[in-house]
Amino acid sequence: MIWRCNEIKNCPGRAHTMQGDIIKSIDNNHVPDVAKIEAKKTINLIKEYATTTVTTTRAILGETSG
Ligand SMILES: [Zn+2]
């Protein structure tokens, strides 16, 4: 996934991540606002958690005995 800086127009800042690790990054042309980046990450984690939390309940019926 690609994190794109949108703090200012035409900023080349990017971060490419794979499973939480930064594999490639392009520097900002200004001082990045870390607080904003962290906020985005948190939102993404919440979304991921929501989609992966699946509860399955299964009742085994009709077991036979010899
Ligand atoms: Zn930037």
Image (spheres, helix red, strand yellow):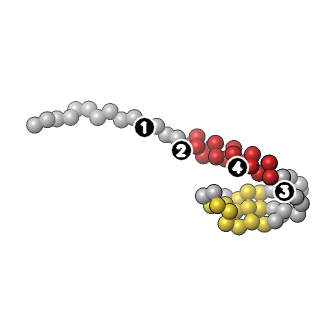
Closest to the camera, between mark 3 and mark 2, is 3
| Residue holding disc 1 | 56
| Residue holding disc 2 | 52
> Does the CB distance between marks 1 and 4 fall below 8 Å?
no
Residue 32 drawn at (x, y percent): 84, 56
- Could you tell me the amino acid type at mark 3? Pro
Kind of element beneath mark 1: loop
In the image, is 31 to the left or to the right of 62? right
Q: Quadrant of residue 29?
A: bottom right
Residue 6: in sight, yes or no? no
Disc 4: CA contacts within 10 A as few (<14), some (14-19) or many (>=20): few
Disc 3: CA contacts within 10 A as few (<14), some (14-19) or many (>=20): some
Label 3, ligand 1: CB separation under 8 Å: yes
First in sequence, mark 2 or 4: give its number: 4
State which image quarter holds ligand 1: bottom right
Residue 43 drawn at (x, y percent): 69, 44
Residue sitting at 88 percent across and 58 percent down? 31
Q: CA distance from mark 1 to mark 2?
A: 12 Å
- Could you tell me the amino acid type at mark 2? Thr
| Residue holding disc 4 | 41
In the image, is 35 to the left or to the right of 43? right
Disc 2: CA contacts within 10 A as few (<14), some (14-19) or many (>=20): few
> Does the CB distance between marks 3 and 2 fall below 8 Å?
no
Residue 42 drawn at (x, y percent): 69, 45
Q: CA distance from mark 3 to mark 1?
A: 43 Å
First in sequence, mark 3 or 2: give its number: 3
| Residue holding disc 3 | 32
First in sequence, mark 4 or 3: give its number: 3
Kind of element beneath mark 4: helix
First in sequence, mark 3 or 1: give its number: 3
- Could you tell me the amino acid type at mark 4? Lys
